[in-house]
Image (tube, helix red, strand yellow):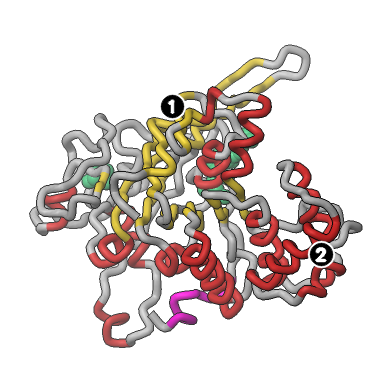
Amino acid sequence: MTATDPLLEVDDLAVHFPITSGVLFERTVGHVRAVDGVSLRVHRGETYGLVGESGCGKSTLGRAILRLVDPTSGSVLFDGTDVATLKGEPLRRMRRRFQMVFQDPLSSLDPRQSVESLLTEGLRAHGLSKGGEADHARLTELMDAVGLPAGALRRYPHEFSGGQRQRIGIARALCVEPDLIVADEPVSALDVSVQAQVLNLLSRLQRELGLTYLVIAHDLAVVRHVSDRVGVMYLGGIVEEAPAGELYSDPLHPYTRALLSAVPVPDPQVEDDRERILLTGDLPSPAAPPSGCRFHTRCPWRQADRCDTERPELRVPDGAGPEHRVACHHAEAIRDGRITRHEVAPEAVDQSVGTAPAAPEHGGSLTEFLGR
Ligand SMILES: Nc1ncnc2c1ncn2[C@@H]1O[C@H](COP(=O)(O)OP(=O)(O)O)[C@@H](O)[C@H]1O
Ligand code: SF4
Ligand SMILES: [Mg+2]
C-alpha cells in the first residue's frame, strides 16, 4: 500500500433522490441528499472503513461508486478511469473488477438454484466460464478458500447458517477475481462470535489475493477490526477521516467523539472514567439538512460564529497527523480544551419531507467479544 497509488478516487460526489408528490401530475417537491459532497481515496491493497448512523448515506455512497445508482454530480475514478463515462461492454468489463458483498447476499438469489449454479452464473455473466470440469475445479478451490467443504456446491442457500451464507456471498464476489470489494454491513446480520470469523476471513483473503476493500458498517467495532483508514459519515458527508488507530485514540470531530463515547470499554476502571457524550435531538432529515455545519443542531461544542452559517471543509488540523482530516471549524480549540462542552438546546428539525430509516436491530457488541 502506498499513499500515492489510489485504486479508487471519489471527488465531490453527490446522490440526490427526488421526492415526488401528486397522483396525476407528479411533481418534484424536494430532494433527499443521501450523499452530498463526498471525496475520498482508497489505496491499492488497503481497507477503508466507512462508519456512521443508519440513514447517513453509506449504502448510497457504496452503490454510487459501483454505478448501481447514478450520481447527481461529482466523479468516481476507478484505476484512473471515470466510471460515469462507461457504457456497454467497457462498463461490463469494469464491473467485473469491483464487486459488492451485502448484509445477506443470498436473500436476493433464486432459492431453487444450487450454490454451484449460482456461482457458475457469475462466471458466465463476466465471460469467465471455461466449461463444466474447469469451472467445477475452480469453484471447489474457491470453497476451500472461503472455508467451506466442496460438498457445499451441491447444496441450496436455505441449507446454510448465516455465517456460511456470508462465506458463499464472499465466494460469489471473489469468483470473478475483482480488485475492489465493497462490503456493505457484511456481518451486521450475524451473531457476534460468527462476525469475528467472517471478518478474519476477509482479512486473510485480502492478504492472499491483494484485494482492496471498502467496508461499510454502522458498528464502530467492526470497522476498527478490519480498517487501515476510517471515514466517519454524518448526513451525507464525511466529517472525519484518519488512520484507524489515530481515529480511535484521538478523535477530533465532536460527532466522532460522541460515537466513540457510546462504545463500552471492557476495563471497569476505564469504563467508569471515560467521557460520555450523549447526543440530544433527532438526526435531521437528509431532505432538509441543517445550514452550515450539518452537525450544529446536535453539537455540544457549537459556537456562535460560523457553525450554523459555513459548512466546514475536511482539513488537516494543526498538530494532527498528515492523514487526519476533520470537518470542524473549531477542532483545535476543542482538542486543546479552549472551548468546552455545553448543553444543547433542542432545536426544531424539519422532518416534513423524507425521513431517515430506523437503525437496524443488532445484537451484542463485537468490542466485548474481541475483548478490546
Ligand atoms: N432509492 C432511494 N430513493 C429515495 N431515498 C433513498 C433511496 N435510497 C436511500 N434513500 C435515502 O437516502 C438516505 C441514505 O440512505 P442509505 O444510503 O441507505 O443510508 P445508510 O446505508 O447509511 O443507512 C436515507 O434517508 C434513505 O431513506
Ligand atoms: S463546526 Fe461547530 S457545530 Fe460543527 S462540529 Fe465543529 S464545533 Fe460543532
Ligand atoms: Mg446501509
Amino acid type, residue under disc 1 in the picture:
Gly
Q: CA distance from mark 2 to mark 1?
A: 38 Å
> Of 346 and 116, which appears nearest the observer?
116
Residue at 64% x, 58% y is: 103
Measuring from the top left, give residue 280's x and y in whole percent.
38, 54
Q: In this figure, which residue is indicated by the disc labeled 1?
A: 74
Where 209 falls versus 20 (above or below)?
below
Amino acid type, residue under disc 2 in the picture:
Pro
Where 141 falls versus 344 (above or below)?
below
Say whether marks 2 and 1 touch (CB < 8 Å).
Answer: no
The answer to whether any part of residue 356 appears in the image is: no
Measuring from the top left, give residue 65's x and y in whole percent.
52, 38
Q: In this figure, which residue is indicated by the disc labeled 2?
A: 157
Left or right of residue 303: residue 227: right
The answer to whether any part of residue 162 appears in the image is: yes
Mark 1 falls on what kind of element?
strand
Left or right of residue 232: residue 130: right
Residue 191 found in image quarter: bottom right
Query: Is 368 part of what is drawn in magenta?
Result: yes
Measuring from the top left, give residue 327's x and y in whole percent.
27, 43
Q: Where's the N terminus, which quadrant?
A: bottom left
Query: Is 170 part of what is drawn in magenta?
Result: no
Measuring from the top left, give residue 212's x and y in whole percent.
47, 53
Tag 1: Cα neighbours inside 10 Å, few (<14), some, or many (≥20)? some
- Report the magenta residues as a range: 363-370
Q: Is mark 2 within 8 Å of ligand 3?
A: no
